[in-house]
Amino acid sequence: MASSSPLKDMEKNFFRCSVCLDQLKNPKLLPCLHRYCSDCLKVVIQISDTETFKCPMCNQHHAIPANGVDGFKTDFHMKSMLEFIQLQNSFKEKELKKCISCSQKKTVTAYCFKCKNFLCDPCYHFHIKNPMFIDHQPHTLNLESYEEQNLTLEKLAALTEDPRCHLHVKQQAQLCCCTCGNVPVCVTCTYSKHKGHDLHDVTELAKTEREALKFKMATLNEFDRKASDLRNKLQSTSRRLRDNVASKSTQLTNQHKQQVNKIQYKIDENTSERERGLKDIETRRNCEICQIRKKREDELCRVREKYNAIICDAGEIYDKETNKLRAKYDEIESALSRMLERLNNQVKGLHETKVQQTIQNETELTKLSDYCEQIIKRYENFRATATSILACNNEWTDAQCIPDIRRACEPLTEEIDRGFPGLESLSDVAMGDLTKVIVDDVRLTELEETVVDVEGIKAKGWRNTSMTSTSEGEIVITGKLSGDRSHITVINKDGKTQIQKQVRREKNCSEYPYRYCSYLSDAIVVTVCKADEMGVFNVRSGSYEKKMISDVTNSWPADRCVTCICTDRATNRVIVGTNTRDLYVFDNQLNFSHIIKLPEEINHSADIALHRGNLLVCDAEGMEAYAISTEESTAKLLYKFVKPRLDGINWRPLRVCTDKNGFVYMLWTAFSSGLWRCLLLQYSENGQQLLTTRIVDGNARCLATLEIGGNEKLLITTVHSGKLYTYGLVVKSLINYYDATSKRSATTDENYLCVS
């Protein structure tokens, strides 16, 4: 029975609240015999919105008492068991507790259910032996004397104190009120609240209740047998149900498979029909879409071609406009750069001119000063002589000397009266004006302005080899005649001969008498002839004075011969080129000065020209043209000219000249397909940029410029036919103007001043 079972054999769930799942606290007993913590039961009741609530364990409905949770009976039996379990736990853990007797905190060994507190070992022995606590002895438990497995519910009930009155908690209960649910009451309650209730002695009532419970238990045991039989029947029925369900399921599964197979067959047929129909539709759709796409592509192609053409045309228009604008402003920028370079060169030239004029003026002033000193000395001598004769007062002396004195006085008087009219001009130097229009570009005319025959050249079978022009507009052509003779011919721009002179070579020479010329000053032209003849020709009188270079210098080998000539009018120098790398320098009186050695890259000079203090050299043998410096005896290579690339022919430079603005012109020649071909190339002022390439007469051999009425022309003559070609040099100048409305500087096409 449960009363004889040890407490340890009872399951822990028996002492656990099913709501909070913790050990019961102040357990309340429901009519269905399920227990809950007082606080947990209060929460369950609060959740219900009616006057009843369901037991969380068995779902039975119970009425909610008027006073709520307090209306349910406290489970004193469960409360006692819980109290003892707590005692066991405290004893096992050897907790220090305060002894109720000595009030010291010690390891307790006993518990008094009447005092409801712990006792230490000495106080426990005193507690059970002292007559004062004789009524406590049955309710005192020595925790060490009882083993856990021997403590039964019956023993626990014997230890616990009888319940107290539920109203007067200090009074022991003597009776039970059956009217109020067998609650313990004291004698006092029989005259007050429980007066007239069904009151019984607890022993008699317990006996009656036990007998009734035993009867109920017997009835329940019979019900247990019936319930067991019912359980067996239910299990048998469940087995038969499972068997029948399995059989029915198998039958249903088979039927389902048959129907599924039939339906699946229909589905497959339907799928096949659908696929065939969809395939047919897709085929027709793809065919039509292909046709539509082809039509669309054709139309798009036509539209694309149309608009591509429109875009291309628009692009070309804007490209042309862009290129035109870029070319315009690039040309302006290039022109401004060239203007700046020319301005710097002009300033440099003006400084050099200023220095030269200053030196010349100072030299002239020195000469005038010396001349003035001579006149003063002559005057002082005249005055001393005349004074001494007059002081002598001798008639014979007067008659003999005074006529001489008077005759000497006349030229002295004339010289004193003449004075120095040019003296004022020596106080200043002439300077160019930088504010004048600066040349931006010089362009050759597209066609020759004139083509004339030089009178007598072709008819006589002469050969032209060189040409120059004077400041007065005369054109001087030199060349070879037959045998050992050469010619110097002066013509005008129309080709009419003004002076023609034939010169015979004095020395025997294996070289042809090719003659070359260059303008020096006023009417003077310097000319050289192979092998070493050099002379000065006056274009007005036709006089010619010559000398041999080998006679004026010891550094002229026998096998050396002249090949070209140029003059430096700023320094009055004459430079003669030879068939070697040596250039011979002379003054304006043809006195030898020194030799300039060409760089090793140059073989020899076929033609030379001065250009801004440097020397331009045509190396026909090396097929290149160069610019070199002439400041020292050994020239330095400055740059090489760009060669023409026309028709893949290897062209060679033949003649070179410059205009007054510093642009360079060069004849390049080549023998191709049995014919001589010739090109005229124009280079920028710095010689670094090729500006124009023009095909000219294949027999062109002479090149020079001519200034007529302020306008400069380019002249070309042929070697045999004697034709004179004249090209106009169109000068463009860039000027700035100020726009009064926009207040800004601008450059337009109207800024170019063209002078032909």
Image: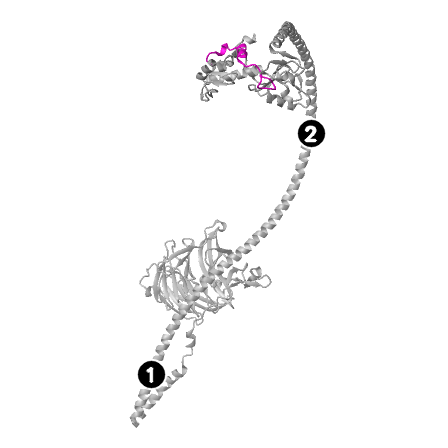
Residue extent of the magenta highlight: 143-171
Name the residue at 52% across, 59% down.
443
Image quadrant occupied by the N terminus: top right
Q: Is residue 382 left or right of residue 163?
A: left
Q: Is residue 516 visible?
A: yes
Local crowd size for mark 2, using a 10 Å CA cut-off: few (<14), some (14–19), many (≥20): few
Work out whether 660 lies above or below 168: below
121 or 747: nearer the viewer: 121
For marks 2 and 1, give the one nearer the viewer: 2
Residue 378 - label: 1
Task: Tell me the tag on residue 285.
Answer: 2
Q: Quadrant of residue 231?
A: top right
Residue 171, compared with residue 336, is above or below; it is above
Q: Residue at x 59, y 61 (%)?
A: 742
In the rendered view, tell whether residue 361 sits above or below residue 245: below
Residue 21 pos. (x, y %): 57, 19
Is residue 163 part of the magenta span, yes or no?
A: yes
Other-residue count near label 1 (Cα within 10 Å), few / some / many at <14 / 14–19 / ≥20: some
Instruction: Give the numbered dot on residue 559.
Output: none
Along the line of sight, the residue nearer the viewer: 495 or 369: 369
The quarter of the picture where the C terminus appears is bottom right
Q: Secondary structure at mark 1?
A: helix
Where's residue 432, x and y in %? 47, 68
Q: What amino acid type should be assigned to the residue bearing mark 2? A: Arg
Please give left or right for residue 297 compared with residue 682 in the image.
right
